[in-house]
Image (spheres, rainbow, N blue to C red):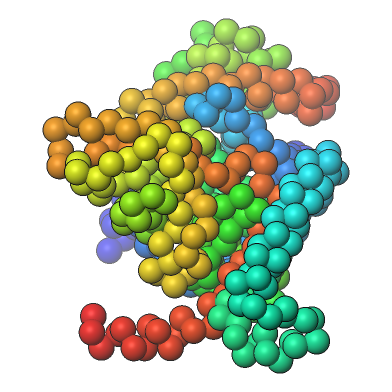
Amino acid sequence: MRISNIRLFIYFMLYVTLEILTGTSLVAYHYAFGFIYLGFLILLPLEISVVWGLLISFVTGLLVDVYYSSLGMHAGASVLMFYFRTQWLSVITPRGGYDQNALPNAKMMGSKWFFYYAFPLLLVHHSYLFFVEAGSLALFSQSLLKVVFSAIFTYILILIFQYLFHSSYRESRL
Amino acid sequence: MLKIFKFVYKYRAFFTFLVLQIVALVFIFNNSIIHSSGFFNSSNRTIASISSFSSAMKDYFLLGSVNDQLAAENAFLREKITNQNFQSGSVIRLDEKENIRFNQRMSYRTAKVVNNSVNRFTNFITIGLGSKDGIAVGMGVIGPDGVVGKVKAASSNFATVTSLLHTDMYLSAILENSETLCSINWPGIDSKYGQALHLPKHVKIEIGEQVLTSGFSGVYPRGIPVGVVEDVDAASESNFQEVKIRYSTEFRSLSYVYVIENFLLEERNSLEAPIN
């Protein structure tokens, strides 16, 4: 338990630093934005308690907000995303339930399950983020395009980074 | 009472969600928190030092183009000084510093861009000068090619600048030929193009005409380039023409900017305040 907490903290530092180092350059064609820090929130262990998960999401979002000078937006979006995650996980439970100590990543759960799991979460997060940022429905179509393209872009990034960072799962499989 | 606690505990996940969400919304809709301190925005010291590390790495690859830009600007300024000396009839020598200081109305400070965004609806730039270097909220910021933005918040070593690429930013400007006053705003997608608002239909606008700062706000001097007229649509149903402009500043590759301090702004504001 203790070791997994330390590992969680290391991932937290890693993802947030990476977001701050690369954040503003991860943009493709004005519409697709990559938010790497979401990888950390999406790959949080399944057994983490909801209250802790919400607090972790809030703090992570707030740090990213400070970097983007957009106080509250990422925090609110991340909290909403985590709350949605708890509901969504019970909807997409595989037959026989989740294994103990299972981690929601493509390697353990299969890439198809991971897509069903992660992509709607990203859509929820980006919808909150871009519609609140636009401040009204005046930029509706632009915001909607941003939401969809950014979700695809972020999904690809998260997929790449989980194979880079989370390579060994031997401990958690035991 | 116990029942209430039991109820709250049973639905603690939902209540935590609710509380955190409300805090986030208060942050979002209460802009004064960002404005008032250098802690909750990108001029935050820790965040800004990580950003400056990352921009230092990028700078290395931009050195060539920055050199060219500075050389071109130097040449332009030399030319301007020569012209001015001809106009005023006497040559200003460098030892006449006292004289220059007496006549000086604005000062320019060079600042390095530490962090920059161009792709959101509300874009900000972080610069490597702060209140310790005399940067104050409300000062104008220009780049080598034209207007960049306005200082929004300052910590001791860094400052956050609202970029022209911010949908709530309106800049007072004039057209070069007719000197008609208009307002420049960013519609929100492409960092290259903005729009000029409030230009009546009888005003003749040429494509390729320069748009310059009006200097009325006192934040920027008069005549700093903002952009060039790219497209004019007079056929719209409103009373005004729809004018698309191409910004002079290349916001994507901004590495150095100048922060303008207007020494006479306070005097002017105190004069105008009773009228307003």
Note whether residue B154 is visible: no
Q: In the shown orientation, is residue A8 left or right of residue B21? A: right
User: Height in image: B67 above or below A11?
Assistant: below
Q: In the shown orientation, is residue A153 left or right of residue B239? A: right
**Image location of residue B256, percent across then percent down:** 70, 55
**Quadrant containing the N terminus of chain B in the rendered view:** bottom left
Note whether residue B231 is visible: yes
Residue A140 or residue B193, whichever sits in front: B193
Residue B197 or residue A129, whichever sits in front: B197
Q: Write the residue at 50% across / 21% down.
A: A149
Q: In the shown orientation, is residue A71 left or right of residue A27? A: left
Q: Quarter-wise, where is residue B63 in the image?
A: top right
Q: Write the residue at 68% across / 80% down.
A: B90
Q: Quarter-wise, where is residue A106 in the image?
A: top right
User: Height in image: B128 above or below B9?
Assistant: below
**Image location of residue B106, percent across then percent down:** 58, 76
Q: Write the residue at 60% across / 72% down.
A: B87
**Quadrant containing the C terminus of chain B in the rendered view:** bottom left
Q: Quarter-wise, where is residue B26 in the image?
A: bottom left
